[in-house]
Image (cartoon, grey):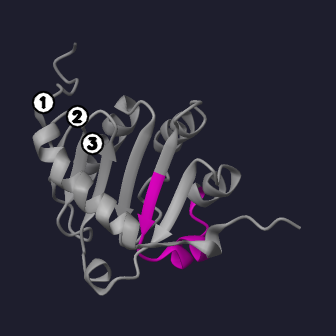
Amino acid sequence: MTADAPVPGEPLPAGNHEQLAAARLALLAQARRQVDIRLPRLDGSLYAGTEELAELRRLATGGRGAQIRLLLGDPAAALRDGHRLILLMQRLPSVILVRVPVDEIDLGNPSASLLTDVGGYLFQPDAERPQGRAALADRPGWAPLRQQFDEMWERAERARMLQPLDL
């Protein structure tokens, strides 16, 4: 391992835009079959880079058990803006599942998160501020975030506006 390589169990730097982008990429690269992503707003700087999309594509086409769950606060804006992830979502709708929060408590939650199936996470208490905490593998830190995501996922509705049209 090089001196610059992230170490499982150690916190990843997540205090500015560059560190958040590096943490996202490291987490996506380490994920095996599943990631869960929660974003109040999917703007063009998130999950749109060539490397991030390549990792998401790798996960989505990785075979049996592959799943990407996205909780998006405003999927219509991502569609309107032509976010690069939308095309991948529409090509692989059985693997990339998108839901929209509808419960008041979830709509008022400003946080963002990325959770991997190997216990890694990136959590931003406020998605609009470039600071948070992250680790490649930290099950004690990951577990409450995963529980919160699962609860929000169960309360959310399918994002029908992102489904491909079968004409």
Q: Alpha-carbon neighbours of circle 2 within 10 Å: few (<14), some, or many (≥20)?
A: many
For the residues bearing labels 2 and 1, Cβ distance under 8 angstroms: yes
Q: Percent x, y for residue 87?
A: 66, 56
Q: Percent x, y for residue 25?
A: 36, 39
Image quadrant in which you'd find residue 90: bottom right
Q: Secondary structure at mark 1?
A: loop
Q: Mark 3 sits on what residue?
A: 23
Q: Percent x, y for residue 50?
A: 52, 42
Q: Nearer the viewer, residue 6 or 111?
A: 111
In the picture, the disc for residue 93 is none
Q: Percent x, y for residue 116?
A: 33, 41
Query: Mark 1 or 3 closer to N-term?
Result: 1
Instruction: Say which of marks 2 and 3 sits in front.
Output: 2
In the picture, the disc for residue 9 is 1
* Image-based side of 48 in relation to 20, left or right: right
Q: Which residues are magenta?
A: 69-84
In the picture, the disc for residue 136 is 2
Query: Compared to 12, does 89 lie above or below?
Result: below
Residue furthest to the right in view is 167
For the residues bearing labels 2 and 3, Cβ distance under 8 angstroms: no
Image quadrant in which you'd find residue 104: bottom left
Amino acid carrying mark 3 in the image: Ala
